[in-house]
């Protein structure tokens, strides 16, 4: 087979070696840490769901109570949740109602550790079985209607803000030949450190990504798929502060594609890169298990860059700017972006790494700034993972 780039095997191997050397220090950090949304995603797979009268989701209430108690999340919040199920003898659904009503499970006496661990694994196994069943159903429908989609697939976006209006537009588009329906999220949902609960009818430039909205749209597209005898795929967006949670909810409700890219949050939403790399790894593990196609965000980078960046003509990039990049399509040394580095160098302290600080104010509220810069917590051996 003719190689498109004409690269030698030695050069390819060297490139992979260099890539591994770049990634490994990042992965070493990622493997040792968890985040609040990784823990909330694990709880969701285990069955934690619902919200209190103020709309605060049950997974958030569990994680926040553990942080407030001083116990932290490094040992895995699933252990605390499973311990509460064992201690109260309630079902997960009943316990969720009690938590939404004000029960602080961090204040409950701990159940027998072995019993809590076994129950935690059982709860996660039940959630994973549901995800596996959804994947099997997708594969069965694709096999039954193989060859009936366009090649390449027709991809259409809906973004009314009202999930029920989105459904009507999506069904009409699918009946006219659309193969993929992408539901755009409401503006800046990526900066919310929680996932809203239930169906939503108001949004700004898009519709909130919630598990109930996923279920409603999936049900509607399945209806059209049966009519047309052609599987219609569903896409949504997981990038942002709740990347693992949205991935988990998408897996449970059989989404087919997901925009899942930590670089989007780093470049466009000022999200702490340490946190979002941890989140991306876990969310992509869930997507892989569910058979969800991952769409990355290079198109966003390029489109935004083309629209907003003005190249400065110069013979070469200034040696004082560490963030300069040659513009694609131009000869090296003829045009370049001369952009000062956005980040100060991280400094070491005896206990941890001091997180990078922006050199100008973050364009968000104090509460968002606090959540975007929350440090990941070190994992302990007792952590549960939906992997």
Image (cartoon, rainbow, N blue to C red):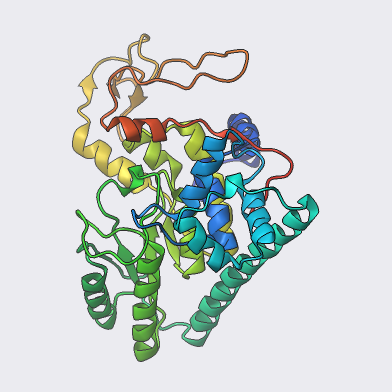
For the image shown, how many numbered marks are present on the structure?
0
- Above or below, 36 relative to 96: above
For this rendering, which residue is in front, 245 or 79? 79
For this rendering, which residue is in front, 161 or 58? 58
Q: Residue furthest right?
A: 114
Residue pictured at 57% horizontal, 69% vertical? 131
Which quadrant: the N terminus? bottom right
Task: Locate residue 365: give its quadrant.
Answer: top left
Residue pictured at 46% horizontal, 86% vertical? 145
Task: Locate residue 313: give its quadrant.
Answer: top left
Task: Locate residue 305: give its quadrant.
Answer: top left
For this rendering, which residue is in front, 196 or 138? 196
Give residue 9's position: percent from left, percent from top. Answer: 64, 42
Which quadrant: the C terminus? bottom right
Residue pictured at 58% horizontal, 50% vertical? 105
For this rendering, which residue is in front, 325 or 366? 366
- Above or below, 115 relative to 146: above
Give residue 154's position: percent from left, percent from top. Answer: 31, 70
Name the side, left or right, on which 313 lies relative to 155: left
Name the side, left or right, on which 59 lies relative to 230: right
Q: Is residue 54 visible?
A: yes
Q: Is residue 287 visible?
A: no
Name the side, left or right, on which 71 lies relative to 116: left
Give residue 385's position: percent from left, percent from top. Answer: 65, 51
Give residue 383's position: percent from left, percent from top. Answer: 68, 45
């Amino acid at each position: 087979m003719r190689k498109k780039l004409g690269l030698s095997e030695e050069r390819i191997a060297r490139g992979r070696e260099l890539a591994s050397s770049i990634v490994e220090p990042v992965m070493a950090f990622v493997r040792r840490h968890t985040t609040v949304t990784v823990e909330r995603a694990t709880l969701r797979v285990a069955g934690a769901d619902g919200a209190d009268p103020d709309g605060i989701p049950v997974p958030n209430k569990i994680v926040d109570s553990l942080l407030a108690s001083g116990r932290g999340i490094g040992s895995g919040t699933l252990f605390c949740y499973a311990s509460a199920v064992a201690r109260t003898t309630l079902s997960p659904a009943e316990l969720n109602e009690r938590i939404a009503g004000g029960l602080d499970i961090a204040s409950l006496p701990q159940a027998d550790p072995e019993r809590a661990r076994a129950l935690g694994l059982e709860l996660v196994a039940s959630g994973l079985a549901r995800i596996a069943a959804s994947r099997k159903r997708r594969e069965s429908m694709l096999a039954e209607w193989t060859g009936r989609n366009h090649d390449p697939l027709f991809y259409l976006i809906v973004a009314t803000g009202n999930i029920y209006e989105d459904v009507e537009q999506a069904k009409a588009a699918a009946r006219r030949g659309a193969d993929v329906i992408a539901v755009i999220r409401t503006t800046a949902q990526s900066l919310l450190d929680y996932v809203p609960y239930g169906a939503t009818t108001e949004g700004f430039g898009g519709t909130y990504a919630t598990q109930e909205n996923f279920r409603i749209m999936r049900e509607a597209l399945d209806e059209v798929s049966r009519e047309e005898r052609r599987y219609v795929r569903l896409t949504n967006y997981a990038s942002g502060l709740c990347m693992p949670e949205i991935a988990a909810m998408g897996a449970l409700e059989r989404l087919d594609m997901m925009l899942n890219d930590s670089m989007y949050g780093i470049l466009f939403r000022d999200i702490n890169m340490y946190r979002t790399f941890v989140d991306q790894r876990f969310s992509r593990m869930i997507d892989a298990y569910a058979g969800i196609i991952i769409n990355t965000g290079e198109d966003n980078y390029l489109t935004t860059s083309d629209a907003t960046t003005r190249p400065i003509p110069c013979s070469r990039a200034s040696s004082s700017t560490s963030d300069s990049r040659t513009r694609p399509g131009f000869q090296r040394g003829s045009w370049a972006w001369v952009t000062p580095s956005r980040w100060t160098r991280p400094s070491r302290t005896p206990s941890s790494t001091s997180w990078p600080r922006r050199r100008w104010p973050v364009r968000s509220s104090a509460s968002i700034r606090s959540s975007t810069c929350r440090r990941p917590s070190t994992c302990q051996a007792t952590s549960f993972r939906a992997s």
